[in-house]
Image (cartoon, rainbow, N blue to C red):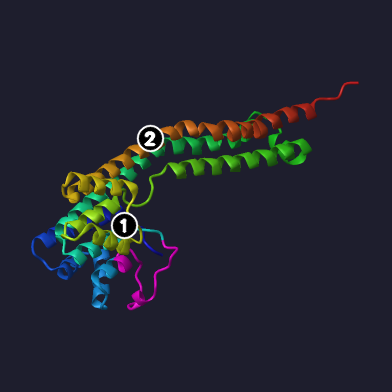
Amino acid sequence: MARRVTTSSTAETVLRLAVLLQAGIAPVRAWTYLADTGDTDAARVSAGVADGMPLAAAIATFASAPAVPRRRWLVAPATSAPPDPWQDVAAAWEVATAVGAPLAESLRALSAALRDAQEAADEVRVALAEPAATARLMGWLPLVAVLLGVALGFDTLGTLVGNPLGIACLVLGAALILAAHRWNAALVKRTRAETGIPGLGAELLAIALSGGVSIERARRLVHSATGGGTDAATDAVLDLSRSAGVPAVELLRASSTLARHRARVEGRMRAARLSSRLLLPLGVCTLPAFLLLGVAPMLLSVMTSMPLSI
């Protein structure tokens, strides 16, 4: 079973690498030192390098993978595997080594980006905890209504399974409970922070340009490492750099920082709006299910138990 990779642990490992590299330790040796401290990610990368893999490929393939036999890297990774932060580390490493950019400085900047992304995701998760817990609690309301009817002495269960109208209430109420559960889950899922590092393209382009290459070559290197091109915001920064005649590296890093800040604010706003949106499944599904499973069976049991008058 594959273990779960957290961005915070990746950021810590990347920062340690940056410190070791800044102290003059060779890249392969730095990974070995980290592996000796018990870092499982570094141990897997070191094992991949020992098998003859390029260092960037070993980072992308082995860092977040479960334990596998050697030479497994010859097999292409499954396309269905979820993305993880080590893919971004591998891309930054590949770009920095291709242009000869300062590797320690590049890794420090990437570590800060990873840490910001994790903090933004944590803030959204904390903000979501209360409304999501409230939605789960309210989901039990129809079942509580059934138990309440039994506790008050009504034949609620018998009516739900023995009366045709009660069976209809049971089926419709169960369908509404299921719909409310899926609706709530969909709302919470859409509110969660997006995967990946906001502004990563600008950060990688800044790393490439810090090696002294042209903008066009930097674009090609980033595209080769990530498989994607630059976005409109990054293109606007490059246009500003050309028109103003200033280096694009700092502008790109500022744009990357701003993109992460914007993602954090947008995540908070989505979490704040979730509380009001969760009222929709509550009013449309949960409360009608409460009436169908709790109130309606009690009324039916009273009506069926009353003697008919002539």
Of callouts 1 and 2, the N-terminal one: 1
State the residue position of label 1. 85
Residue for point 73% across, 41% down: 161
Q: Position of residue 259 (x, y in %)?
A: 29, 44
Residue for point 18% across, 70% down: 28
Residue for point 65% across, 30% down: 291
Q: Quadrant of the N terminus?
A: bottom left
Examine the structure image and report whether residue 78 is included in the region drawn in magenta: yes
Q: For this view, does 72 lie left or right of residue 249? A: right
Mark 1 residue type:
Pro
In the orientation shown, which residue stands out farthest toward the left? Answer: 23
Q: Which residues are magenta?
A: 60-81
Q: Position of residue 195 (x, y in %)?
A: 37, 51
Q: Quadrant of residue 124?
A: top left
Q: Position of residue 247 (x, y in %)?
A: 16, 50
In 3D space, how far apart are the residues under numbered discs 1 and 2 (Cα atoms)? 24 Å
